[in-house]
Each structure stands twice: as structure tokens, then as C-alpha cells.
Amino acid sequence: MSPVTPNLGDYEQTAAAFDWDTARGWLDGLPGGGLNIAHEAVDRHAAGARADHVAIRWRGRRGERRDISYGELGRLSNQFANVLASLGVAPGDRVFSLCPRVPELYVAALGTLKQRAVYCPLFPAFGPEPIRERLQRGGGVVLVTTESLYRRRVAPIRDQLPELRHVLVIAEPDQAPAGTLDFRASLAGASEEFAIGPTAPEDPALLHFTSGTTGRPKGAIHVHEAVVAHHATARFALDLHPEDVFWCTADPGWVTGTSYGIIAPLTHGVTSIVEEAEFDAAGWYQLLQDEGVTVWYTAPTAIRLLMRAGADLARQYDLGRLRLVASVGEPLAPDAVAWAQETWGKPVLDNWWQTETGGIMISNYVAMPVRPGSMGRPVPGIEAALVERSEDGHVRPIEDAGEPGEIALRAGWPSMFRGYFGDPERYARCFADGWYLTGDLATKDADGYFWFVGRADDVIKSAGHLIGPFEVESALTEHAAVAEAAVIGLPDPILGDAVAAFVVLRAGFERSEDLERDLLAHARQRLGAQVAPRSVRFVEDLPHTRSGKVMRRLLRARELGLPEGDLSTLERAEQGSEGAP
Ligand code: AMP
């Protein structure tokens, strides 16, 4: 194997010379002008020399395998675009998927983009409540799902979704439930020819729901121009080259699994591995070895599990083709970087971004020395700074190395979100003085490396998934026994943070182990196992602000024995007898 020359050889030089127009030039654009993600990801390869190159190598849960070439992916996604057109789905309409990692998901995503509808993936481990909430808020008109997910999670809430006109179900022949359409039969009946209509770079393309501290999930809208950043960031941070075999372990139900599990690798014409099965240490090493993965994009939770499985296991496999390992989603501890270096012969390149940014913003690079524990430096084209918000709505840049501040990004990069669906005010609140404010705290050293400090809000990151405490609290308070609930993240050696609930019971209900089990089961059934709390603690009361909001931060500080911080807004009763009438 000949050595691969890194796309980004010298950080300073590349960052200084780069502009987004250069990156636009790396893409084709639509034949008649305009820009469409699916054209860049599939059609331009399908029409050229890479038509027979494997685009997606799918490995099924039961050992099945399916290679889909760029040519075939082009035809299949054309068929899906035709299905949507025949169902009356118009550009801008929202098409949702709720699928395990199966080939149909990729066909649906790309076909939706070809029809210029907005693709919105849902995490398949969600329970009925998060599914209903997102489909309702996003006004989904079509849902693609599997027969089993439909029966268990969607059928019970279908009557609450009047805007949902069609459900396409991936099912065995003649097994599609009443009131649904058979995905495969519909596809088979559709033409393989489809011409993508005029698409402006600013046309909406993707809707990703993310979690906030308060209120319901937020739908971040991304436009077709985002593909410019997907492609460029994968070139710089993941160092993708056309002959790479790439594996992104993130589920496409989250933004990483869409930006870097569907779009970016295809724009580079590489072979992308899709593994349907869930994590299994030996299974993952086997995959890396057997598929000859060269670039692997994963997450700290998985790396912690692999560390726990031990270096001896790793050494039983030949990872000789692996050239780059990258990680995202949570802080990556320095010991994980060192362990990887020792065990796999290469460091893990941490990078940082979020749903709203659409693509990698701060990153380590193969050709730049890694400082273990640091997220690296801004991707070329991205201006990142640390700022402090002031009362008057402005921000003050923090210049001193080592002083913590909120990560702010100069607005205007191609994959920046263009709105929160249906909530322009919330969107506007994310910006000040031309900066997008991320809600994450970090420090920067004298050489410009960023170091993650924590979130500025109460959102929980568990196993790499962002979880809004409010959504979990709402599900808990639906239970007859619960008067009030507060949900926080507590440190967990594998998950990063584990979701922990504190519950005040209504009068007439007694604390008991049975009730605890019942509450946990209720939450799991409503929310899905990944979102539901892992523990419930009964408490007499919860700390509140004077305006009545639960102070989750204080609850967490008390739980962990950390300093309680500013208590000036704490409700009087909590402050003891001081000031009591
Ligand atoms: P999401 O929008 O679900 O992708 O989550 C984004 C959030 O995950 C960020 O705002 C951070 O709080 C966290 N995050 C992402 N990448 C990293 C990283 N490399 N280190 C620490 N936290 C991260």
C-alpha cells in the first residue's frame, strides 16, 4: 500500500489560502446550474468513471451483505424520488425516516433530496413520544419505516398526526400493514430515470432535531449548500481520498450519521461501510480487519468500551490498513488518545461540532501534532473564537490564552443551520455581533488549540446522544405518581453522563422499589431506552429559582459535591430561614 499524502499538509498554509469558493469548485453543481446534495453525492459519480465503484457496503444483522454501486444507488434514489413525486410530495415538504441502518434508509434520504423535499431522520431507538413530537413539529407528510417499528411505535400515535399523509413500510411481500404503502413494491413500480429539478443552494434540504434545556426539541434546518462544507471538512479533517474504505459508526438518526455517514463520504466517491448491528468489541475489530477500513469515524463512548475490552483483543486483529481514527460527540480524554496510540498505532483525532453547525468545525488533522485532550483547531474556512455574553446582547471576545469562554463561530459558513423550524425568535437568539453562539465552553491555548470545558446549559450528553432534560421530565410527570421531576446527567464511566431523574411524589403515593421500577418502565416505554433515565431518586422537593424553574445545575452540583455557584436566584424556601417572613 503506497503512503497517502494528507489533503491538509500544513495547517497554517492551508487555512490561510482557503476560501469557500475554492471548496465550491471541488463540486460539480447541477448541469443547468444550482446545487443539490444528492447530485454531488451520487449522480456525478453514477454518470462517470466511478459508476461501478461500491458506494455502500451494507452488512446486515444476520450476516447478510449487499454492495451497492454508485450507479445502482443513483437508480434506486431516482426511483424513490419518482415515488415521492407520484405521491404529490412537493419541494420543501418534509419526509421523515425511522429506520435501522438498512439500505432503504440511504435510498430514501438521497431520493428525498433529489425530489427537493426536506429529509428528516429519526433515531430508531426513540419511543412513540419523541417520534410523535418530532413528526408533529416538523409537519412530516411522509414517513419511511419498517413494519415492526410501524406496528410498535407509529401505529399507536398515527391518529395524532393528521399531516402525515403516507407511510412507506419496509416489509416482506404483502406484509405492509393496513394504511401503509409497501416501500419495496412502490420502488419497483417506479422509473429509474429522474432529472433533479432546479435547486438553489439556499433551498432547505435537511431537518435535524436537537435538544435544548427548556421547551420542546428544536428542528435545525440545513440547506443544499451545506454539501460544500460536508465535502471540504471530510477532505481536511477525515482526510478522505477516493480509494478509502470509510466507516462512520454514528446512526443516521443523528446529524453525524447523516453528514458523515451518508453525504460526505459519497461526495468523495469512497466506499462507505454500513453496519446494521449494534456495538460489539470483537465484531467491530473483525469489521475493521475484514473490510480493510482505512478511515474510521467513531465516538468516545465506543472508544471507552473498546478500552474496557482490552488491548489484547485489539491485537488479535490486523488493523494494518487503518490510517485515521477520528472521534466526535463528547470529550475525548487524553488517556484514550494515548491508549489508541499504543494499541492501534495511531492517536484518535478528536473533533468538535454540533447539529446546528452541520459539519466539523474544530478538529485535529493527520499532519498536525495532536495535543491529547484538545479538540484541535478550526477547520480551514471557519473562524472560531471564545466570547463572553454581556447583558446588553453583545459579546466580548476573550483574548487571554487559558481563560474559558463560550465557543462562537463567525456566521456564514455553508453548513450553518438556517433556522429552527417554526421558531425564528429562538434562532435569532443564537447570534450576536455576527457570531453564532454555541452554548459550549472551552479554553484556547497560545497556539490556537481548543480545549473543551463543558456545556453552558443543562443539556445531557449520554452515549453521544444529546438529551433535553425537559423532554424526559415531561414524560415522567405524565405518570400519575409524579408531582414534579428534574433530570440531570451524572458521570458514568461508559456513557459519559447517565440520565438521572429526581422525582417529587404526589400526595397519596409512597416511595417504593416497585414504584421506582414502574417509573423507569414508563419512561422507557414513552421515550425509548436510550433517552429514558437510568435511575430514579425520590426527593421531598427540588431547588427552584424565584421564577419557579428547577435549578438542575444546583441539583447536579449538590449531587456531585461541587461548588453551588451563584444562588442569588434561588427561591427563598431553599435558602433556609434567611429572609423568611
Ligand atoms: P449534537 O448536536 O447532538 O451533535 O451535540 C453537540 C454537542 O456535543 C456539542 O455542543 C458539545 O457539547 C458536544 N460535543 C461534540 N463534540 C465534542 C467534542 N469533541 N468534545 C466535547 N464535546 C463535544
Image (cartoon, helix red, strand yellow):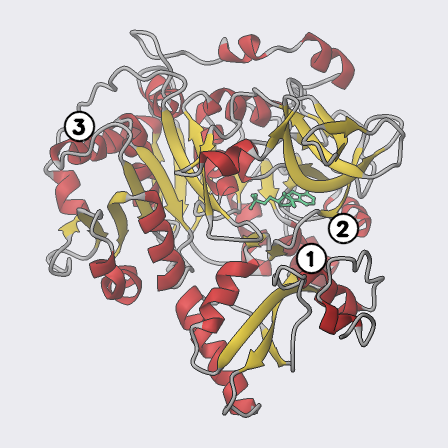
In the rendered image, is residue 240 in sight?
no
Residue 538 placement, left or right of 401: left
Residue 535 in the image: state x and y as whole percent: 60, 75
Residue 356 placement, left or right of 457: left
| Mark 1 CB within 8 Å of ligand 1 | no
Q: Amino acid at mark 2?
A: Ala
Residue 25 in the image: state x and y as whole percent: 50, 8
Seen at 51% across and 38% down, the residue is 426
Residue 192 is tagged as 3
Label 1 close to label 2 by CB (< 8 Å): yes
SS of the residue under disc 2: helix
SS of the residue under disc 1: helix
Q: Earlier in the sequence, mark 2 or mark 3?
A: 3
In the rendered image, is residue 455 in sight?
yes
Q: Is residue 174 above or below residue 198?
A: below
Give the Cα separation between the discs numbered 2 and 3: 47 Å
Res 366 quadrant in image: top right
Q: Amino acid at mark 1?
A: Arg
Q: Earlier in the sequence, mark 1 or mark 3?
A: 3
Residue 462 placement, left or right of 95: right
Q: Earlier in the sequence, mark 1 or mark 2?
A: 1
SS of the residue under disc 3: loop
- Residue linked to disc 1: 304
